[in-house]
Amino acid sequence: MNTEIHKAYEVIKNGGIILYPTDTVWGIGCDATNEEAIKKIYALKQREESKSMIVLVNGERMMHQVFNEIPEVAWQILDFSEKPTTLILDKPKNVAKNIIAEDNSLAVRIVSEPFCYKLMERMKKPLVSTSANISGMFTPKTFKEISPEILKGVDYVVNLHQDKICKNPSTIIKLGLDSQVKVIRK
């Protein structure tokens, strides 16, 4: 795993994009502070830049690097979640502008998957995560279902867990600073 972390880190550090396993599905990712790398992902996915993507963090400290204010209910939801949960929070900071939604919010998920966790530990930055598919197409449940277009379009494919059958994508919950809670995806 350490070799794969090193290779992925070098690609990301140089502005590249990677295809990698997450705690849910295979993802396309890059440094969440690198606007040019994020543009590459939008182009590869043929996705409108107005549609934001998820950012992964590896714990509470990194979560605080990305948001000034985190509603207390966010921690409660994460404590009680039985599956990976993505929160959409208001007023992100220290990330590229083109990853922030038009309403000044950002989707974020704390990961437990060892590769992702250790990669971000090395990067000291959050990691973009978006499903490994062309926008509007089905989300692959296995590495073998990822389209050749995606495989050829990334700068590096992480050589781990390629036989794993992925779970469903994460639950997504939007939390406003006004304490409003809205479930986007169960």
Image: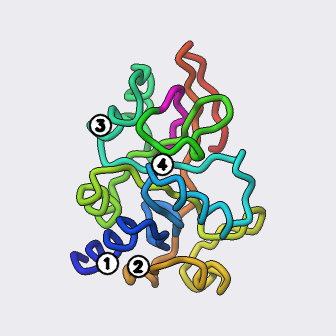
Q: Amino acid at mark 1?
A: Lys
Q: Residue at x 46, y 84 (%)?
A: 163
Q: Amino acid at mark 3?
A: Glu
Q: Is residue 152 left or right of residue 110?
A: right
Identify the magenta region.
84-92
Confirm whether the magenta stretch covers residue 28: no
Lower position in the chain sequence, tag 3 or tag 1: 1
Q: Dominant secondary structure of the magenta stretch? A: strand
Q: Amino acid at mark 2?
A: Val
Question: Label 1, on which residue?
Answer: 7
Question: Label 2, on which residue?
Answer: 158
The residues bearing labels 4 and 3 have C-alpha atoms spaced at a distance of 14 Å
Lower position in the chain sequence, tag 4 or tag 3: 4
Q: Residue at x 27, y 51 (%)?
A: 124
Q: Are marks 1 and 2 in contact (CB under 8 Å)?
A: yes
Question: Label 3, on which residue?
Answer: 60
Lower position in the chain sequence, tag 4 or tag 2: 4
Lower position in the chain sequence, tag 1 or tag 2: 1
Question: Can you tell which quarter of the image residue 6 is in?
Answer: bottom left
Lower position in the chain sequence, tag 2 or tag 3: 3
Confirm whether the magenta stretch covers residue 85: yes
Quarter of the picture holding the N terminus: bottom left
